[in-house]
Image (cartoon, helix red, strand yellow):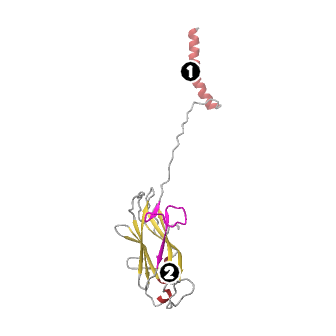
Amino acid sequence: MADDNRLTRRRVLGGIGTIGAAGALGAGTWVAYSDTETKRLATQAGTLDLKVEGEDGQRDSQDDSEDMIRVQSGPLAPGEAFTDVEKLTNTGSVAGQCVSITIGDVSSSEGENPESETNTGGSGELDDQLGLRAALDVGDGIEFFFGGSDSIADFDDVRGETFFVNEELPKTGTNDESGDDLIIQGLFRDRSDNNAAQGDRLEFDVAVRLYENRCEEGSKPDK
């Protein structure tokens, strides 16, 4: 009898798993044990942090990938030129692959209005007579945003426009002053109507933006 009880118990105990499996597949009232562990994973987006001469420029926004440069020209004599050079560095955590510039926020004023000036009303005329070119010195050569080694663009043709150069600006760290030089050059063209611009003053901003990816040829980045 004891053997029968042991046998019966053995069969019963052995059958529990079968019944449990059948019940779980059938009515769904049987469940298997489970243990779930959750591990929190954290990730952080990389950053681009563009610096002009090691500092943040005059920003219109809180975007670290953009800085603003104020360029002033004058007094210039006809045929004279000016050059503004700014060191660009990326102190973020990822490299940038494209640099763009936008010429904007132009202030053209009449200045001191000498007697020989032929137009003393309204805004100044220096912007109408100024040629401009912009380039990035990448160490082993010069890449032009607009203009060229033997050419210069009319200021009125580039104001409000965005131009780009595909050039890597690697992350440099906060204490590294290495980077690329942004070169802005202007020329007061020698023309027959130069008297209209005598004493005039011109100020404009150059918005410099760094992009993580390369910019597509034939298109312009968003401003």
What range is drawn magenta here? 49-73
Q: Residues within 10 Å of mark 1 (few under 14, many from 20)?
A: few
Per the rendering, the mark at residue 14 is: 1
Amino acid type of disc 1? Gly
Residue type highlighted by circle 2: Arg
Front tag of 2 and 1? 2
- Which residue is outermost to the left? 140
Q: Secondary structure at mark 1?
A: helix
Query: Quadrant where the N terminus lies?
Result: top right
Return the x and y of residue 192 as percentages of the image width and height. Answer: 46, 91
Tell whether label 1 touches label 2 (CB within 8 Å): no
Q: Which residue is mark 2?
A: 201
Residue 32 point in image, percent of width and height: 58, 30
| 70 inside magenta stretch | yes
The label on residue 33 is none
The x and y percentages for residue 121 are: 57, 87
Residue at the image position 58 percent from the left and 11 percent from the top? 4
The answer for how far apart the CA atoms under marks 2 and 1 are is: 98 Å
How would you rate the neighbour count of disc 2 (Cα within 10 Å): few for under 14, some for 14-19, many for 20 or more?
many
Residue 202 part of the magenta-drawn span: no
Quadrant in the rendering for residue 133 = bottom left
Residue 27, percent from left and from top: 65, 31
Question: Image point 50% across, 64% down: which residue?
Answer: 66
Counting residues from the start of the chain, the first of labels 2 and 1 encountered is 1
- Find the residue positioned furthest to the top: 1
- Which residue is at the front of the view, 139 or 199? 199
